[in-house]
Amino acid sequence: MKIAIHGADGDFSERWIEYCEKNHIDFQIVDCFDSKIIKTLENCKVLLWHWRWIQPESQIVARQIIASVEKMGILVYPNLDTCWHYDDKIGQKYLLEALGAPLITTDIFYSKEKALEFIKNAHFPKVFKLRCGSASTNVKLAKTRKEAERLCQKSFSSGFKPMGEFFADSKIKIKHTKDMSHFFEKIKRMPKFFIKYYYANRIIPRQIGYIYFQDFLPGNDFDTRITIVGDRAFGLIRHARKDDFRASGSGSVDYDHKKIDKRFLNIAFEITEKIGARTLAFDFLLDAFGEPKICEISYCLPSFRIFESEGYWDKNLVWHPGNYYIEDLIIQDILQELQIKR
Ligand SMILES: Nc1ncnc2c1ncn2[C@@H]1O[C@H](COP(=O)(O)OP(=O)(O)O)[C@@H](O)[C@H]1O
Ligand SMILES: [Mg+2]
C-alpha cells in the first residue's frame, strides 16, 4: 500500500509527510503537475493533494487530474465531489439549489440585457460577488440600482481581476498583527506573497461575462463557519469588520463552541453527505426570520482554525473536546476507507 502526497510549502502535505513517517506508512512525494503523474501513481492506492488558489496552476488542471485518477480506483483527497466547486461560487449556486440546501437567494446572469432587466426590478442593496476569491476580497455591497448597473457594465466589458488587489484591506491586516516581530515577519513575506498574487491574477481567467447577485441579509454582525471533516463538525464565529457587513478575512475569530447554533451543524452534516465531500466548510448567516442560510462552501481552510477550535461534535451532536489536526483526521479517514474497500 502506498500513499502519494503532492508536496508543497505551507500546506497540509507538510504534516501528512510527518504523519506517515511517524506511523511508518509507506508514502511517496509526487508532483501532480508532472506530465507523467498518471504513470507515477500506478502503484499507489491513495493520493493526497491539498490544492488551492495560491497555486493557480491547480485551478487550470486539478479537477481534471483528480477525475482521471479516481478512474484508476485510487482514493483521492480531495475527491471530485469534495472539490469541483472549490473557489467557484457559480458552481456552488447550482449544486446547493439542486440539493435543496438553504442557500441565500442567488441570481446569476450571463447576458448584459438579462442582468439589466433584473436590476430594473430588483430591491437593493444586493451583494455582488465574483465566482472566485477569499477573505471577502471579491464581495461588495451594491447599495443602489445605479451601483449595480455600473458593476454590470464592468462585468460585460473589461471584467475584474480574479484575485482582487494585493493591498486591499491592508489596514485590517496591519491591525491584526500581534507584535512588531510579527509585523516585520509579514513585511519580509510580502514580496513573495505579492508575486503569488500577481501570478494568480495573470493565470486565473479575468472574471467577465457573468454577474452574480445575492440577496443581502442585514444584521449579521458575524458569520458562523462550520467545517465538516468526515463525521466531525468544527465550529467558530467570525466577527464582521468595523462598519462593514463582511466577516470573512476580518481575523476576528471566536472559538467558544457554546455560541454555535446547533441548527447549522445538522444542515452542514446533511449537505456534506449529499455532496459526498470528505471535508467541507460552510459559511452560515441568519435571514430576517432567524433561519439559517448558507452563504458559500469551501473544501479547504487554514489548518490552525481547526486546531484552535476547542473540539468537535459528532453526528449525534455529542461534543468531543480537544485540539485536532485536520491533516491527521483526513489521513485517518482515508486509510479507514481504504481498509473497508479492501
Ligand atoms: N448575502 C449576504 N448577506 C450578508 N452578508 C453576506 C452575504 N454574503 C456574504 N456576506 C458576508 O461577506 C463575507 C464574505 O462573503 P463570502 O461569500 O463568504 O466570500 P469569501 O469567499 O470572500 O469568504 C461573509 O463572511 C459574510 O460575512
Ligand atoms: Mg466565505
Image (cartoon, grey):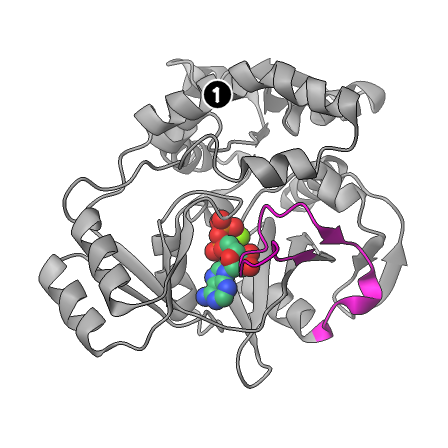
Residue located at (27% from left, 42% from top): 207
- Determine whether, in the image, residue 253 is placed left or right of residue 2: right
Residue located at (72% from left, 72% from top): 261
The location of residue 175, given as percent across then percent down, is: 68, 38
- Confirm whether the magenta stretch covers residue 173: no
The location of residue 201, given as percent across then percent down, is: 35, 28
Mark count: 1
Q: Is residue 100 or residue 71 the one in the foreground?
A: 100
Q: Is residue 339 or residue 215 the one in the foreground?
A: 215
Query: What is the magenta segment's predominant secondary structure?
Result: loop
Q: Report the residue that reaches farthest toward the left.
A: 113
The location of residue 33, given as percent across then percent down, is: 43, 18
User: Would residue 96 be seen by someone viewing this image from the given angle?
Assistant: yes
The location of residue 321, given as percent across then percent down, is: 90, 55
- The part of the chain drawn in magenta is 238-262
Q: As displayed, is residue 341 above or below residue 311?
A: above
Q: Is residue 321 or residue 134 the one in the foreground?
A: 134
- Determine whether, in the image, residue 56 is placed left or right of residue 246: left
How crowded is the residue under tag 1: few (<14 C-alpha within 10 Å), some, or many (20+)? some
Residue located at (61% from left, 70% from top): 267
User: Where does the N terminus fall, quadrant-wise?
Assistant: top right
- Determine whether, in the image, residue 174 is placed left or right of residue 15: left
Q: Which residue is disc 1 drawn over?
A: 194
Q: As displayed, is residue 31 above or below residue 112?
A: above
Q: Report the residue that reaches farthest toward the right.
A: 321
Residue located at (50% from left, 16% from top): 31
Element under disc 1: helix
User: Where does the C terminus fall, quadrant-wise?
Assistant: top right
